[in-house]
Image (cartoon, helix red, strand yellow):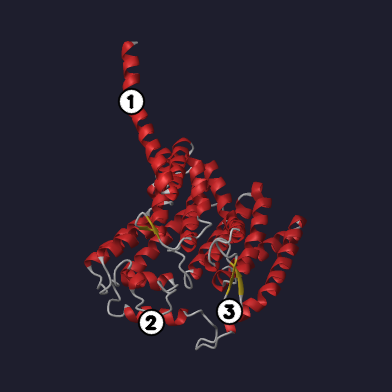
Amino acid sequence: MTNFEWGSKMNALPYGMLYLVSALFLGTAVIYQPAIAVAAVLLIILLVVSISRPELISYFVLLTTAISINFLYDGSMFGIEILSLYKLVILVLLVPCILVNGLKFKLSPPLWAMLGLVFITFGFSIWLPEMSSSIAAKAFIGLSLPFVFLLINWKKEVAEKQIRIIAMLPLVSVLAGVLLQVAHLHAFLDIEFTGAVRIQGANIPAHLAMLAFMGIGISFIEIKRSPQHIRYFYIMLALNFLILIGTGTRGPILALVLMILYYFYDISRQYLKGKTQYLIPLLCSVMLIFSAVYLQLDNIKKRSFERTTETGVDLSGRAEAWEYFLNKVADSPWSGRGLGAVTVANDGTLYKGFVVPHNEYIRFYFDGGYIGAILLLLSLLAVFLLVYRALAPPVKPYYLLFIAAFLIYSFSDNTLSTVQSIIPFCWYLNCLYRSSQ
């Protein structure tokens, strides 16, 4: 009994000191640095919740991807670029999830491919004068982090909830955008110089379009895979389609054409077999598409044909950017210029928005050459195949068309390096794999 009491007193002393020091720190911070105090309190709350209910933190982390934090806050915090800090924080928050659920390395090929790109960078790449080791390290960490989300061994019921959250991320962004507009912190609409009006929510239009693209593709798959939630995913499908059209972003719309056509073929076939319940979604889908196209036709014309270009269709500077980056890597086609080199390649010749070429194939060809780009592509295909084998036969066509749409989309945007695309994508592949086994 004496030992127990003595042990309790000894244990109480460090905790008491910890509470006292924390209180003094927060009290001082409130006076001199209120912002830091608020951030510290929020971080402490998140850490406590992450330890006690780690699955709740996973839902929170997913919801944060609905907001492009680097476009809402331009700068750094604690000496760290805001986007890098965001990635670091979500990794820290997910550590308890990893400890509780464990890691399964079957879907790890992209991480090994990224290590291969680092080896190529330091062993064989011909660096640009602006390139440095710190740029390569930063690029490796930033690009590899989303692939860690392929490894977490989520419980099936948690994975199913996460899938439903990913499907609703575009709606979360739109609602957050309304609140930010009311608070005069961020414009809900983006009006281009062409006169095109685009919805951007709590993002920029291109990032909201990425979320909507994911939401549409996932809804198509889950309507077939999860009949118990079919009403929810039909609602998300309609809302995400309207949001995507509202962003005026052409790449994801074109990428989804094959998937949409197959969907119409599939439900038409079911209806002709005598399943009359498919008539309502069929008619509603047709009306939705025609209404959306009619409402956005003027915007599409302004964005595609307002300026006269050599390509005939306005690609928003992509054709010039692609040519620029391809010319700049011509001297090192097999090993590229080094991981992350593409981010410092624009010497001012191109519009400043082209920090990367808006084409992931060119981006990784620039960084890793033919060897690095092919290595990464093969590693992704290995993951796609593993997930495909776990799916039920009726789901497989939708899944393949979703992957095809993602690969097509990657020709015109930064799908593997933008938070709003690659994190939901990797997270969904992992959840789909875990819940389908």
Q: Depth check: give the residue in front, 42 or 149.
A: 42
Task: Relative to 352, say whether 109 is above or below.
Answer: above
Q: Earlier in the sequence, mark 1 or mark 2?
A: 1
Mark 1–mark 2 CB contact (< 8 Å): no
Disc 2: which residue: 349
Instruction: Please tell me how crowded label 2 is: few (under 14), some (14-19), or many (20+) other residues with Cα within 10 Å.
Output: few
- Amino acid beneath label 1: Leu
Q: Position of residue 422 (x, y in %)?
A: 46, 60
Question: Residue reaching furthest top?
Answer: 1
The type of residue carrying mark 3 is Arg
Picture quadrant of residue 184 = bottom right
- 267 relative to 32 in the view: left or right: right
User: Would you place residue 318 above or below residue 379 in this image?
Assistant: below
In this rendering, the label closer to the viewer, 2 or 3: 2
Position in image of residue 309 (x %, y %): 51, 87
Q: Does 353 sit above or below residue 29?
A: below
Q: Give residue 214's position: percent from left, percent from top.
A: 55, 60
Q: Quadrant of residue 138?
A: bottom left
Look at mark 3 in the image and give the residue it sits on: 303
Mark sitting on residue 13 = 1
Mark carried by residue 408: none
Residue at disc 3, secondary structure: helix
Q: Nearer the viewer, residue 219 or 324?
A: 324
Q: CA distance from mark 2 to mark 3?
A: 23 Å
Numbered disc 1: secondary structure: helix
Residue sitting at x 39%, y 42%: 28
